[in-house]
Amino acid sequence: MTRDASRRRFLKQSAAGALAAAGITSMEEYALASHRSRANGPTASTPTAAPGDAPALRVEPNSKGTLPTGRIGDVTIGRIICGGNLISGYAHSRDLIYVSDLLTSYFTAEKIMETWAECEAHGINTMIFGPSDERAARIYQDYRKRGGRMQCIGQLGPNKDDIATPVKQAADAGMVGAVLIGNYGDEWTREDHVDKIGEFVERAKAEGMIAGVGGHELRTPMMVEAAGIDPDFHMKTLHNKTYWSHQRPDQEKEVIDNYGVDNYWCREPEAVVEYMQNVKRPWLAYKVLAAGAIHPKQGFDYAFQNGADFCVVGMFDFQVAEDARIACHVLAQTAQRTRPWYG
């Protein structure tokens, strides 16, 4: 072992001890401490080098329980899906102006692949990110070449006048699905361009991918269903409102009414739950943890109990094992619920 490696191990072990001495008060602190306490020896996500080749990925099954799966079309998907915003450097950070730089500094190419391998080891077999993010796309291709099996659903924001090109790019990149990003789903619905949403869905299906429509606003899935569009799934925000967030004092009421409260992306969760009870297609719930403001136990329980079939969650590598464990526990408790499982 090199001197630098020994020093890093010592620092990690010392940091874990300091956290334990100070007292662990949050899920993030607990997960981080657990991650650091595993500093001795390789973990399931540790790449092992092959002489003369790119490092092969070592992905070992989780021995503490398997994350349940569902199906959308012919694609088998774990009930927890890895969000791509963290890896791409985008995150709702309220008034913290350094978060995107922090994320892109933390998530090196190797760290991204370690995170995906950790997800796979715990049954999280699918992620979502935009194929237009060239860096993430290159890393994903490298990950696959090194033996990774993580599936990807492309989150797309095409120009209304050229929907075909980005959809084909996603298919050519090996993505199993395509979803119209929520901002575009909302905008096209507000602008009465639901026909373009239909075109997106049909083009994605024609390329052999499962096709979904994202939205922050309830009227988006409502208008899609009313128009007779046939997506393979909806991707709709869902979280409760019992967490603190910030409203800028300089915002006009019109802006506030249009999601001016930072990170407040499901203004009417009760109405969403009521409406989705009668929608007979898979539902991917996202922003369920409100960018870390809601504990996974509370967020997963609220989403799955109220009808979501899958939860899309942004995760650091040290959160994956705990999120998977909590999700397995919550799903075991939500086998019986009002809305049938779709997918």
Image (cartoon, rainbow, N blue to C red):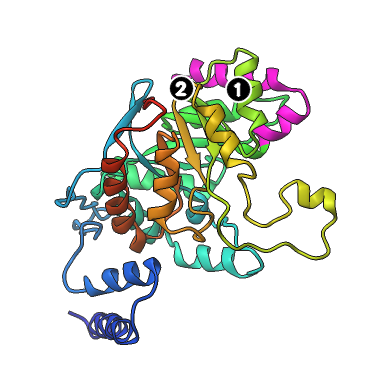
> Dominant secondary structure of the magenta stretch?
helix
Which numbered marker is on residue 134? none
Q: Residues within 10 Å of mark 1 (few under 14, many from 20)?
A: many
Q: Which residue is mark 1?
A: 200
User: In the rendered image of this protein, does residue 270 appear above or below residue 168?
Assistant: below
Q: Which residue is mark 2?
A: 281
User: In the rendered image of this protein, does residue 28 appear above or below residue 282?
Assistant: below
Magenta-colored span = 184-209
Decide which of 11, 276 is in the foreground and name it: 276
> At 40% across and 29% down in the image, what residue appears?
338
> At 25% across and 85% down in the image, what residue appears?
10
Tag 2: amino acid: Arg
User: How many labels were placed on the picture?
Assistant: 2
Residue 289: % across, % down: 48, 53
Residue 80: % across, % down: 37, 43
| Residue 62 in the figure: left or right of residue 115 | left
- Where disc 1 sits, the SS reads helix
Q: Residues within 10 Å of mark 2 (few under 14, many from 20)?
A: some
Image marks 2 and 1: residues in contact by CB distance under 8 Å? no
> Image quadrant for the C terminus?
top left
User: In the rendered image of this protein, does residue 333 appear above or below residue 12?
Assistant: above
User: In the rendered image of this protein, does residue 300 appear above or below residue 73?
Assistant: below
| Residue 109 in the figure: left or right of residue 324 | right
> At 36% across and 32% down in the image, what residue appears?
337
Residue 130: % across, % down: 54, 41
> Image quadrant for the N terminus?
bottom left
Tag 1: amino acid: Phe
